[in-house]
Image: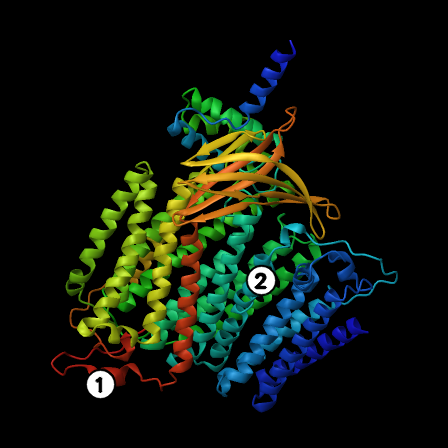
Amino acid sequence: MIAVVVALLLQAAAAVDQPLPDPALEARAQSLMRELRCTVCENEPVSQSTADMAVDARRKIRQLVGEGQSDGQVRDFFVERYGDYVSFRPSNWLLWLFPFVLLVGAGAYLALRGFGRRHRELAPVPDDRNNESA
Amino acid sequence: MIAELGHLLAFFALAAAAGQSVLGLTSGGETVRRLAVASGMFSLLAMITLIICFVRLDFSVALVAENSHTLKPLIYRIAGAWGNHEGSMLLWCLVMAGYGAAAGLFMQEGKLRDRALGVQGLLTTASFAYLLFVSSPFTRLIDAPFDGGGMNPLLQDPAVALHPPMLYLGYVGMSFVFSLAASGLINGQIDREWAKRTRPWALFAWSSLTIGIALGAIWAYYELGWGGWWFWDPVENASFMPWLVGAALIHSLIVTEKRGGMSAWTVFLAVLAFVLALLGTFLVRSGVMTSVHAFATDPTRGIVLLVGLGLAGGAALALFAWRAPMLKPGPEFDPVSREGALVLNNLFLSVAAALVLVGTVTPMILQWLGDTGMISSEAASLSIGEPYFQLTLAPMVAILLLFMPLAQAATWRKAEVSPLMKWLAPAAVAAVVAALIAMAMGGWGLWLGFGVLVGVWVVFGVGFDVMRRVGPGGAGRFFRMPLTVWGMAIAHLGIGIFVIGATVETATRTERTFPLKPGEIAEMGGWTYEFLGVSSVDGPNYTALRADIKVTHGGSTEIIQPETRSFPLARTSTTEVAIRKTLTGDVYVALGDQVRDVPGSWRIRIAQHPLIDWVFGGAGLIAIGGFLSLAARIRARAPVTTPEEATASGESPAVPASTPA
């Protein structure tokens, strides 16, 4: 009887951070752990924290990944329970788009200002002292 | 008495700075210079008195009583002087006044120096006023306690003792770049001479900032116990934004100095770098977020900082709007030229800074809107972290770096790309081969291959560019290369090495936690770890649990001893990881908690961080490159030639001269 209890306890302890047998799945699980937030910590992903929430989240992530769920499904599972706050990967597409819009917009502005106009008549400044520095 | 002396010295520093600002902005000359040096000296003496209070453990000084302790080792008593809000504000004032004093000592006299000292004096006066009237480090306690409250044990570390001074040399150093920009605008002189005299200050501040940020990352790596070195935490981003803008600035200053172009943009960046440094300080200090840096959350500090930020930024922008129309555009250039490449550099770095800014402040603004009830609480809670910054920033940085070796080799005004291909084709081949090898070794990750491709391209591209410059002359010519070329090459090489290290580390690091009982063995990546047990050890102001682990790899065996230290006074504990360095990276072992309900079993966290030293070494090279460039500025005090002169002296008459716009 005691042996059974000890065996169960050992199994429970081992279940903490027991990696998935498939290294590819484990790698996916670990990268998910890095982008989900420990909601009771200050600014930490669940991969780092020793808080109970993080330990539970790690176990849940491995379970879901092990069951064959996609990264998106695992993320949705957590966002449904904890809200957008739990994911370090914001779902708002405006946020994702804006840096590239800014880059293209600023680039277009520079082109219109004439930075893109070829000056075939110009010659390089000869390789003198002015050219040495950067 | 010593604390009162410090207080008095701080008042002297304030008075000198006030005089410096009035005279600097109205007249100028020798008196301004002397006042600037005096203000710096008084600030230094004030800082020294505070350090003496900390070293002598004068608990009648409130700050010492709160932040030090008899059991604290000497070096941390010294560092404790700036490891708190009031003390770090004094450090801020010292660095600000110190830049003024340095300018007084080293800058050649003239209106640029006088007005810059005036503006710097204004900033220094405001900082000292805030220090003395709102948060004085020299306040006494009526009942001195017998012992102090101690210091956040996480900060009791050599890297983090040096982190604030270096970071401030960078962060606060941007204030003098700002002052030079304001001075140039006031004088209506933003030209090649201005750029030439501003660039050393920008290089010094930016290189110091690089070291300050790297020290913070190193500290996070080995002190926080999880092996990360950058987490896109708002605190980190707060220093990264001025770094990005500073990087853009030191490049655009080259165009202004060498060609007289981009002057309006350059002066705008000089203002922006300081405004972002102030914004960063606001984010860190006002308590809008919590972190190890938020020493105490005090809303009044936030308001003062916000007002200061608004005043400095607003005044500079007003000056800029007033003077911008009179700034002349530089001579024309072809898009394929050194100028064109540097415009591209500035475009990418500025967009990167904007993206980090938006990613950092959006969650804070939303949270504030939620707290005030303007939007629902679901809409208000949002996290932006590593996946966002990595996925948006990486492609931009990659494009920027693909152009870097070309930019290095490009000539001013117009560049011929085809002759460069001879030199850069081997770099491209090396990059592709290295990327394929890395992917084959690291599990065919696209991310890994992409990062290694870019990094190796940069390293080889820089190498071939140096070979091209040296030409067939051999080693002698190599060592006679101008310092500026050395500076550029080393900094750019550092970027390549950093990129390789950062991608390989993040893409292939492995970590695992093993529950182990004494005598049990864990295996990971060809290493065996035999857990021998945990013992209790006493330190100066902590007690530690120390694990003994026998590590075996390739026939050699050694004992490593990770610890967890608990600091009874601060009621916190820290992890002291055991790191074993190898040529290919670190093996990193941390002692975790005891496994619940299983007596004698401990969680041992084992991680492998490949090429981690490349990350920090790359950052170090970037800073060294910056300092070498600065050394070159100081050594070469040759008179500036105007673009017309350069054109007249160097250009072949067969080519029609360009008409400066």
Q: Nearer the viewer, residue A117 or B427?
A: B427
Which amino acid lies under the numbered mark 1 shown in the image of this protein? Ala
Can you see residue A95? no
Marked residue chain, label 2: B
- From the image, which quarter does the C terminus of chain B lie in? bottom left
Q: Residue B43 vs residue B316: left or right? A: right
- From the image, which quarter does the N terminus of chain B lie in? bottom right
Element class at badge 2: helix
Q: Nearer the viewer, residue B465 or B321?
A: B465
Q: Residue B350 vs residue B83: left or right? A: left
Task: Choose top left, top right, bottom left or bottom right for residue B649.
Answer: bottom left
Numbered label attached to residue B359: none
Residue that badge 2 annotates: B162
- The percent position of residue B416, horizontal first and vertical second, equals 17, 66
Total labels: the figure holds 2
Above or below, B51 against B604 in this view is: below
Above or below, A68 against A108 in this view is: above
- The percent position of residue A30, horizontal first and vertical second, equals 46, 33
Element class at badge 1: helix
Which amino acid lies under the numbered mark 2 shown in the image of this protein? Leu
Question: How packed is label 1: few (under 14 Cα within 10 Å), some, or many (20 or more)?
Answer: few
Residue that badge 1 annotates: B648
Marked residue chain, label 1: B
Residue, x 29% and y 60% (percent of image)?
A: B404
- The percent position of residue A93, horizontal first and vertical second, equals 42, 39
**Nearer mark to the viewer, of 1 and 2:** 2
Residue, x 58% and y 31% (percent of image)?
A: B518
